[in-house]
Image (tube, rainbow, N blue to C red):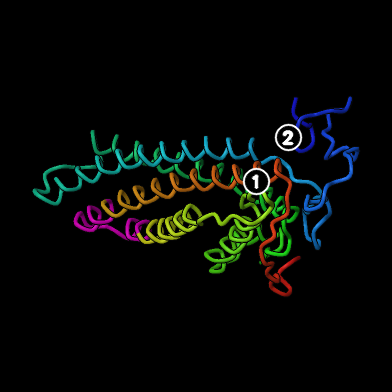
Amino acid sequence: MLCTRCRIRTAVTDDGLCTFCSGTRPPLPDGLMPTVPGPGGWGVATWPRSPVGLARAVTALLGVVIAADLFAIGTGLHLRGLWQQVEADGALNVYTGDGRTAETLYGIAALSQGVALLATGVVFIVWFHRTRRNAEVFDPSVQRMGPGWAVGGWFVPIANVWFPYRVASGVWEASAQTRPDGGWRTVPRTPLNLWWGAWVVSLLCTQVAERLWERAEEAEAIVRAGGLLAASNVVDIFAAVLAVLYVRAVTGMQVERALHGRAPDGPAQDPVPGAHR
């Protein structure tokens, strides 16, 4: 049975705690990481908590996002095709019959995208904050932003395309696996960089496409905007797939890091002054 507190190690006490969380563990050999709190900040704990359950929820919700995007692509391209007929001969009335059905389906698709994105965003931020708290336990010296920024950084205009990446960068570095001798083993940041780049591109593409769609009145403009919306949804699917890979990578590293329990011997970096809150 897993420990009821960290959900990582095997429970050994009657109340379901492991030796690490119960405080009954034997003295640690040289090089093992003690459970000491970091330099402070909102939500910093003295032990790592398993991100596995949240990671599974995020992965499932990202699957829902992908499904909603595919639904939006299909309904959007169908509606765009009807407007292409209007552009070609002007004989079709898209506000009756098949046109009205296509508009309704596309509206449902847009609504499902919004709901899926909102639910995924909430759970993802909870997972993101937990991994940041764990990173504070693993190695607080490499953290560039305080734990609170794992949540607040997403809601700061303009800065939200950079602050969360700084948080994620510190989490990645602190969560990197260690070699059997306790030394640092470099883990390429490819999943992190690809996910973040795709997310920023998806965000920009969606904003541009939606603005063009809202302003489009003539058939030609609607057809063009519909094509851009479909393309932005494709980019969003690509970003969601990369997000799954990123979540799995960080979760796997943190589980291995917690089970291994050694502090890396690599050089420490000073955190940005004033970044912790």
Q: Earlier in the sequence, mark 1 or mark 2?
A: 2
What is the quadrant of residue 174 in the picture?
bottom right
Tally the marks: 2
Circle 2: residue type: Arg
**Label 1, on which residue?**
254
**Residue 223 within the magenta-colored segment of the rendering:** yes
Q: Which mark is residue 7?
A: 2
Label 1 SS: helix
> In the picture, which quadrant includes the N terminus?
top right
> In the picture, which quadrant includes the C terminus?
bottom right
What is the quadrant of residue 209 in the picture?
bottom left
Label 2 SS: loop
For the residue pair 144 and 114, the one nearer the viewer reads as 144
Q: Would residue 197 be found to the left or right of residue 230 on screen?
A: right
Residue drawn at point x = 82 percent, y = 33 percent: 18
Q: Would residue 179 be found to the left or right of residue 238 on screen?
A: right
Residue drawn at point x = 29 percent, y = 55 percent: 228
For the residue pair 165 and 154, the one nearer the viewer reads as 165
Q: Position of residue 195 (x, y in %)?
A: 47, 53
**Residue 206 within the magenta-colored segment of the rendering:** no
Q: Which residues are magenta?
A: 209-226
Circle 1: residue type: Gln
Q: Residue furthest bottom?
A: 273
For the residue pair 203 and 9, the one nearer the viewer reads as 9
Crowdedness near tag 2: few (<14), some (14–19) or many (≥20) residues, C-alpha within 10 Å: some
Q: Position of residue 108 (x, y in %)?
A: 40, 38
